Amino acid sequence: MMSPVIRISDGTFERLQKHAVPFVDTPDTVIGRLLQFYESHEHRKTGELKDASNAVGGEFAPDNHPDLHHTRIIAAEFDGQPAYGWNELVRVAHRRALEHLGTFEALRSASLSNIAKGQRNVEGFHYAPEIDISIQYADANIAWRNSLHLAKKLGCAIRAQFEWRNKKGAVLPGQPGVLSWRLDQIKA
């Protein structure tokens, strides 16, 4: 199946370029990221994460949750920093972890993700220029596991509000869910 061809004005293209990572993004990836951001915000009525704990999917234990395949992030935060997708949550977690830990070597030791110093754009790695590391993208289950692991290592709060897509293989098609962890949840 051929992808549709779209035409955009020079002005719109210039605006897209302002949101692109050079040599990494394409117009399609920038538009996709902008749509994901828009869609995650159209579900919000306030600046805070919407509470889905009363919904059918509800809140799940962070270490014992249903299969996250075929889910999409509605809103997420790691240590107070927003993220708009599973792999962006991993990226934010690594950025915050590097700020806390100080060195790439300490980050590599603390992380469950496959990471490399500098730019690497093969084998599913994606470059995070703001911290000069490349992170291998993973499915939602691994992305959550790796982000949660860093949250626990750092003692940072993490929260992800998501929904299962209406797809074959989704555990709860169309249903919302919430995963969260805070250090004070385990202290007695």
Image: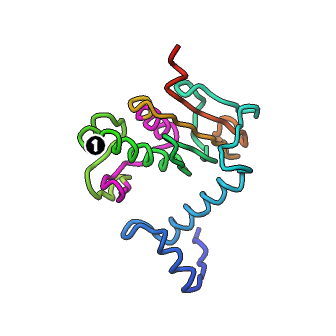
Where does residue 140 sit, x and y in percent of width and height? 52, 41
Return the residue found at the far top. Answer: 188
Where does residue 117 sit, x and y in percent of width and height? 25, 51
Q: Residue at x 53, y 49 (%)?
A: 83
- Look at the image and say whether residue 161 sits in the magenta stretch: no
Q: Is residue 30 left or right of residue 113?
A: right
Where does residue 89 sit, x and y in percent of width and height? 49, 46
Q: Split into 4 quadrants, where in the image is the N terminus?
A: bottom right
Q: Is residue 154 left or right of residue 101?
A: right
Looking at the rendering, which quadrant does residue 93 occupy?
Answer: top left
Return the residue found at the far bottom. Answer: 10
Q: Is residue 22 left or right of residue 108?
A: right
Judging depth in this view, the residue of 4 and 118 nearest the camera is 118
Where does residue 92 sit, x and y in percent of width and height? 45, 47
Judging depth in this view, the residue of 82 and 24 nearest the camera is 82
- Look at the image and say whether residue 149 sits in the magenta stretch: yes
Instruction: Identify the amino acid type marked 1.
Output: Gly
Q: Tell me: residue 28, above or below residue 13.
A: above
Q: Residue at x 40, y 32 (%)?
A: 154
Count all numbered tags in the image, as a single digit: 1
Q: Residue at x 56, y 51 (%)?
A: 84
Residue assigned mark 1: 102
Q: In the structure shown, which secondary structural element does the residue marked by tag 1 occupy?
A: loop
Q: Which residues are magenta?
A: 126-150
Q: Residue at x 52, y 25 (%)?
A: 63
